[in-house]
Amino acid sequence: MMMMDQMLDLPPPLSNEVPMMHHMINGDAPQQVILVQVNPGETFTIRTEDGALQCIQGPAEVPMMSPNGSIPPIHVPPGYVSQVTDRNGSGQCVSRTMRIMLHPSTPTNRLSLLVCLCFSGEELQYTLTDLRPATDYHVRVSTVCNSMKGPSSDARAFTTHSAPPDTPLPPRLSHRTKSSLTLQWKVYVYDVLAMLFVIPDCIVLSSFHFQGKKNSIFREYYVGHQRHCKVMGLCPAVGYTFRVAALNDIGTSGFSTEVVFNTTGSLPQTSLPPRLAQAGPSWVTLEWTRPNSCSNEEVVTYTLEMQDETKGLDFQAVYSGLELNRKVETLKRNTQYKFRVSEWRSAPSSLLVCKTTPDRPGPPVNPAVNAVTYHSFCVTWEPPQDDGGSGDLTYVLEISEGNLEGISEGPERKHLCEDLKPATSYSLRLSCVNVVNLLIPSTVGNVKHKEMTLQWGDENVEFSLEMCAMEEGSEPTEVYCGSKTECTVGNLLPGTTYRFQVRAANSAGYGPYSESVEISTAAGPPGQCSPPAINVRSHTCADVTWENKVSSGIDISEYRLDWGRDLDSLELVYSGMETCFQISNLEASADYCCRLQAVNQAGAGPYSDLVMYRTPAAAPDVVSGFCCVDHPLNPTDNEPFSHSTCLALTWDEPHCNGAEITSYCISIGDRIFTTRNETCHIIRDLLPDSEYSLQIRAENEMGPGPFSQILTVRTRPLPPSPPRLECAAVGPQSLKLRWGFSSRSQLTDDTTYTLQMENRNQRFVVVYRGSSHTFKLQRLSESSQYRFRIQAVSEAGEGPFSETYTFSTTKSLPQTLKAPRVVQLEGNACEVTWESIPPMRGDRISYVLQVLGGRDSDYKQVYKGDETSFQLSGLQWNTDYRVRVFACRRCVDTLQELCGSFSPSAHFNLRRSDATLAVEADITRVPMGKTLTDEQFAGLIVFGVASLSVLMAFLLQLLI
């Protein structure tokens, strides 16, 4: 921004009249040095860096620059006018106040402040030229007589008028997307040497869709103070032209040069053109179809635009919505309109040109009967006041002696009625009909360079369509005759205008022709190009040249060169106006083909004849993918592979460049290994834990290729020995295995272990792989033997497997039974029943029943056997009893008895009654406040022990 003048509190002689030059902001620019020349008898007052004022008496030359590179403020005494002169420039002095803006990029220059002599002579007036607009100037005058200079007059200040800003630079593209372009532009910031500085008040940015200069119109997109603008709602892959102008209160500058920027993305799909369904005097009904690329669930918004040539060339939106038809109203009768439709993601469709129909004409006026005789009379009339918008009228005259009967139809405005009865009264009726505008042909879809499709009125009569060229002496030709309302006319000349008209016919004959419509075919594409010529530069490069094709009528806009290995793989490699192109990155001894096509504004011409080309053969390319793998690709049983003494190498076969590869050479130190035409090799007899540098190259009959990059590999140390495997814990369905370090090798922390188990097919399968030293196998079968082996793996490789270890699972305990059921019998007896368990793998199951009653503290066993019920007798009345049961497994092979856990206890109370009652015992657990079950009591003990342990650990932690 510009530094404004400031006033300081100085002594009275300097208080109100001293202009001040504010310090200049140096920023990152080089330091500036300004010399102030103080004339004799004059004083400069400056403010130093510490804020103090310093007065300098003239004559003096004071260098002005603060330690940080900025210039301190300079206070000019009364009557002194400060000016700036660029001594490195033209030397022209421009007198003005010190309002300076130093741009950060301004180079170091030597400036001086001095009074500029603008005129010397005997005239009493002088015109100052080359002044800046809206700038304050100070002038003073003095007299000289006989070489004696008198004192200077007081300085008179004036300000030049404002002016429109200069033309700005064209906008620059800062960001673009598929639907938007963000532009920036710069305003002129005048350089401190020429003392130029201006900021326009506002910027005007305009843009237009790039469609060619014929119909392109600039539209204003932004007016404001910002220096950037984001233009939204653009189409993908479309070029837009922009220009910018500066605006202030005085006026607007000229527009900058036009620049073209393209949005990203692929070319949008063009919408299908609308169709004319019906037309009336003030309306037309249009229809269009849904794009094939849109799914049925997708919501598509259509925009219908109309061009009224009487109002301008712009297309105005008349409808935006989801419907596939629209009735456009408030149109002028018998007027031509152009329509196009687009959906939100596609480009506008081709134009539909159609006309509204004429309106119904008024009745003929002033009918009169003349020349009446005994058998005839003559009828005349005037045309109607309103012809309905069409000048071609057909008059219908009807006469009636009793019933109306038409006797005349035509454009004439009189008719002679003959063969009448004498002395008879007749009634006459007149009407007029204009040409039905539905018969005016209109185009459908795109007008091509050799054909076009026309459509007209309803399918109720027969039609005849005539075509005539616009050249003088051309005769009209009937191109269609039939009942259809649409016809495609072919074999037309590109860029030629034709006139079409249609007429309808019925049993009475043909009616009049419709209004003629002039339609021009599109310009034709250029003809076929000559085959391009190919010049060989090397086996990877070729130059393609072609002749400049002369197009008939339209200049060629670009050439397109397609290049590929065959016809199906041709791709566009060049498009432009040059007649040569260099193709690189070719393969040696390979077949290529190319073709050329010329393009103009009308489209692309046919391709030239296909040109075939074959590159010469060469030595093989450099070998890529040269690496060392863990497992050789071609192992042999005769020679075992060890990662400690062998290296398995592999590589990708390079391009042979037209000659088959015969061998590969591998360099390892001072040794060279030659292999066959294979992409893998094993180098043996190396030292363990040693580093090697390797290179490889391919050879063919054309010679050896270049060596590959150096591959540095290291052989592994000797692999570790297997650890000893032990069984840490055994269960009926699980085995917990444990292994330790091997005594014959030292295992590192990154050693992993592979544990394998023999399956039913007597094959070892991996059940664990990791760095842990324990592993628990689940879901095993009880009382079964399993065979295991283990292997240690480290960076040195996979060690050998250990010997086979055999471990067996134990037998399972019987399951816990549910709480038994108690039923009171007669007297003081009860029957206790419980669920049964089937035999486990051939072992019989027995049951043990225990009872706790009265004041007893321990359960007593009252039954052991195979039955699932037992009768208790001799019980005491009104006494609480508890019963529980558990199952025991009798192992046949080991004669061992395995007992399961106790079932939940069942509580019952034997009550005295007169009749024998079968009572289902109460199996619910006793509340905690009264009596605890065994399980609850055991849980309470566990909880107490755990709480005591935590408390002791906490106390020990505090003591330590």
Image (cartoon, rainbow, N blue to C red):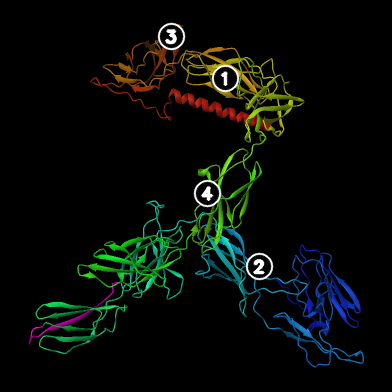
Is residue 421 inside the magenta stretch?
yes
Q: Which sits in the foreground, 441 or 499?
A: 499
Up-down relation of residue 575 to residue 661 (above or below): below
Q: Where is residue 482 in the image (x, y as percent from the top left)?
A: 27, 62
Q: In this view, does 219 lie above or below 346?
A: below
Q: Give neighbour class at mark 4: few <14, some 14-19, many 20+ (Cα, 10 Å).
A: some
Residue 75 relative to residue 421: left or right:
right
The amino acid sitting under disc 3 is Cys
Range shown magenta: 420-436
Of tags 1 and 4, the one toward the viewer is 4
| Whole-percent x, y for residue 603 in the image | 49, 58
Residue 367 in picture, x, y percent from top left? 20, 87
Q: Do the residues labelled 4 and 2 touch (CB within 8 Å)?
A: no
Give the distance between the C-alpha atoms of the residues marked 1 and 4, in whole angstroms.
70 Å
Which residue is under mark 2?
186
Image quarter (top left, top right, bottom left or bottom right) of the C terminus: top right
Which sits earlier in the primary sequence, circle 1 or circle 4? 4
Amino acid, disc 2: Lys
Q: Can residue 37 be seen in this view?
A: yes
Q: How far apart, in angstroms, are the residues tagged by discs 4 and 2?
A: 51 Å
Q: Earlier in the sequence, mark 3 or mark 4?
A: 4
| Residue 891 marker | 3
Label 2 or label 3, whichever lies nearer to me, is 2
Residue named by callout 1: 755
Residue that appears at 80% across and 81% down: 18
| Side of 867 where 751 appears, left or right | right
Query: How much space separates mark 2 and mark 1, taking CA atoms?
Result: 74 Å
* Residue assigned mark 4: 609
Residue 323 seen in this snapshot: no
Residue 786 drawn at (x, y percent)? 51, 14
